[in-house]
């Protein structure tokens, strides 16, 4: 424990000159993350209440979202928030298989508005889903999702913990990239939605 505390202090001291790192608040921020990491996570394995969709269909949707995320060159946090919004919405509302991709598109639209400086436009999403949905349908689903979630789109992702753990452990880029890859792969696994983000991040880094 003393070694970990020393690494934390060294890490924050090395980044004290960077105003974006906010070294004087970093430990308080991480303590807050640890206290609240499960607040906006899905509370149940919801598929048993979804008569038309399955965990396999969810995996196919997320695989597609990862591809769209890559093509749009979006921030990593946008991807994690998108998946979180999908799961939280599916936990609360029944969705037909025809509208599952619409839920994914709308979740990414919300996540990008929250995380990105220059988020993609609705016409970009229409193009990516081969015009399967109209602009009005996407806007309507966006409103339904925000209303169902009480406009609460904030959450603590496993990626947030990973970034901190990598700095403290002084892991190299290869280990970081491999841990990041494992976290993204874990999002395809329906059973992982109830795991604590901090545990997922630490497990991925340990294996890397």
Image: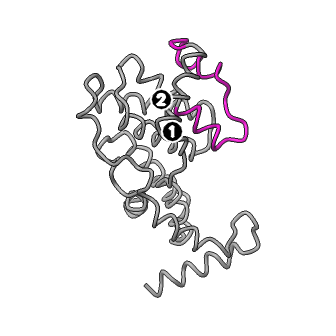
Query: Where is 10 relative to 19, above or below?
Result: below
Numbered mark located on residue 53 in the image: none
The residue at 54%/44% (across/down) is 153
Q: Position of residue 11 (x, y in %)?
A: 61, 75
Nearest the viewer among 124 and 33 is: 33
* Count of numbered marks: 2
Q: Nearer the viewer, residue 144 or 16?
A: 144
Q: Is residue 192 above or below residue 55?
A: below
Residue 60, above or below 116: above
Residue at the extreme bottom of the image, as rendered: 2
Give the percent coordinates (x, y) of residue 157: 49, 53
Residue at (34% x, 54% y) in the render: 195
**Residues at marks 1 and 2 touching, judged by CB atoms closer than 8 Å:** yes
Q: Which residue is mark 2?
A: 104
Magenta residues, as a range? 107-133
Residue that badge 1 annotates = 82
* Label 1 element class: helix
Q: Please, what secondary structure does the residue beneath circle 2 have?
A: helix
Q: Quadrant of the N terminus?
A: bottom left
Q: Residue 197 placed where, x, y %?
A: 42, 57
């Amino acid at each position: 424990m003393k070694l970990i505390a020393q690494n934390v202090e060294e890490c924050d001291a090395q980044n004290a000159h960077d105003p974006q790192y906010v070294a004087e608040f970093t430990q308080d921020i991480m303590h807050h993350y640890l206290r609240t990491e499960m607040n906006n996570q899905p509370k149940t394995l919801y598929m048993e209440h979804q008569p038309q969709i399955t965990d396999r269909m969810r995996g196919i949707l997320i695989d597609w979202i990862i591809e769209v995320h890559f093509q749009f060159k979006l921030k990593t946090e946008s991807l994690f928030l998108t998946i979180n919004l999908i799961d939280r919405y599916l936990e609360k509302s029944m969705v037909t298989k025809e509208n599952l991709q619409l839920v994914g598109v709308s979740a990414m639209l919300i996540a990008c508005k929250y995380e990105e400086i220059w988020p993609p436009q609705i016409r970009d999403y229409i193009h990516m889903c081969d015009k399967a949905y109209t602009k009005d349908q996407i806007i309507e689903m966006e409103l339904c999702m925000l209303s169902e979630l009480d406009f609460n789109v904030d959450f603590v992702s496993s990626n947030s913990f990973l970034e901190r753990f990598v700095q403290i452990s002084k892991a190299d880029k290869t280990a970081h990239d491999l841990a990041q890859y494992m976290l993204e792969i874990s999002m395809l696994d329906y059973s992982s939605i109830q795991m604590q983000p901090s545990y997922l991040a630490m497990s991925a880094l340990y294996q890397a």
